[in-house]
Amino acid sequence: MAILDVAITHRFSRFALDVKFSSDGPVLGIFGPSGSGKSTILHAIAGLFAPKVADISVRTRTVQSHLGTFVAPERREIGYVTQDALLFPHLSVRQNLLYAPRADGLDSLNAKRILDVLRLEPLLKRTPATLSGGEKQRVALGRALLSQPELLLLDEPMSALDAALSREVLALLLEIKEVLRVPMVLVSHRAHEIAALCDECIVLNEGRIAAKGDPLEVLARPGHSAGFDNILRLEITRHERDKGISWLELGSGQELAAPLSERALGSRASVGIFADEIILCLEKPRGLSARNVLAAMVRSTVESGPDTIVNLKIGQAHTLLAHVTHSAAAELNLTQGREVFAIIKTSGCVIL
């Protein structure tokens, strides 16, 4: 069953939005630059904006149609979280949470699960002025979830946070997805957020859909990554806490070393690697500080400006893009089928 069906056509004075898509979820990502129409789509789904022509259904329930149906925002059973937590400053955290529509108190089994996942119990007596940015977003997420939504809309919820707090909120969203199982739509201009959380991805460009599909495949296409050139989805196999390293399974007997993560063994994580962080050599080196020396094979090469982009096959299931100079590509004879070693520092592998 589709969690969302959307068809919108609307012309503004300097911008036209024309999109049609369906998503089975559980998490759909909408990716694109500022001004591409991402937030406008969320506003339409939530009922905060009525497009000229629109057909929108949430879990097969029509909330707007071109025939005249328009369900009011408060009756759509949709939660909405923005980059600004929008908490009431004069109310305690408990009172902010209970302000959620359809909230049935904080003692129900559902409410206790939400409080537990978001670690909100210690914050209940505090006021928004005493909370950090990450804590405010946890409260905003809790309030939205306590409204028992059929769908949770997330409009750049991490864009106003620093890197550490952004990772914290992203981890919470992953837990919401896995434990509470609430379908979500995430709007973001950060590729790593989409890759880490979403099962499907739509890329917008000037109000139209430029690409749709698996996030790792879509965001790896030229012009869409807007962040890491490589994003690998891997299983964490072991931690070496004394060395500050987590190891992830690459297959074919190879592992990838990344900075120590607190994620559980056996869990899957998205790892971002910039193409220019990868060094290629023809023989396996010795005595290196870099922990990752990966056997690879050249799949293809493409010249792009001052660089040659080398598409590498790692094991049976993974590919990496590396940037080298034209002269290096020629000297190493980086042609299809060439066996090489890819060297990557541990710090060059970012667990998202």
Image (cartoon, rainbow, N blue to C red):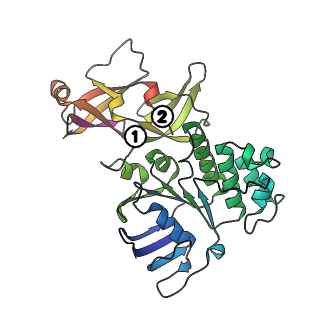
Residue 275 position within the rendered picture, expressed as x and y whole percent measured from the top left: 33, 35
Q: Which residue is mark 2?
A: 350
Which of the 4 image quadrants contains residue 277?
A: top left
Amino acid on which disc 2 is placed: Val
User: Is the Cβ of the residue at disc 2 closer than 8 Å to that at disc 1?
Assistant: yes
Q: Which secondary structure type mostly characterizes the magenta part of the structure?
A: strand
**Is 310 colored magenta in this rendering?**
yes
Left or right, 206 with respect to 39, comes to: left
In this rendering, is residue 20 above or below 266? below
Residue shown at 79% from the left, 56% from the top? 91
Residue 122 part of the magenta segment = no
Crowd rating for badge 1 (residues with CA inside 10 Å; few <14, some 14–19, many 20+): some
Q: Nearer the viewer, residue 130 or 287?
A: 130
Quarter occupied by residue 288 = top left
**Horizontally, is 250 left or right of 319 in the view?**
right
Q: Which mark is residue 228?
A: 1
Name the residue at 25% across, 36% down: 310
Q: Nearer the viewer, residue 332 or 45?
A: 45
Residue at the limit of the structure toward the top, as seen here: 287
Task: Give the SS element for disc 2.
Answer: strand
Q: Secondary structure at mark 1?
A: loop
Q: Residue at x 36, y 40 (%)?
A: 229
Image x and y of residue 215, in percent = 43, 52
* Three-letter code for the amino acid on which mark 1 is drawn: Phe
Determine whether 288 is above or below 178 in the image: above
Mark sitting earlier along the chain (2/1): 1
Q: Which residues are magenta?
A: 308-319
Name the image quarter holding residue 153. Answer: bottom right
Which mark is drawn over residue 201? none
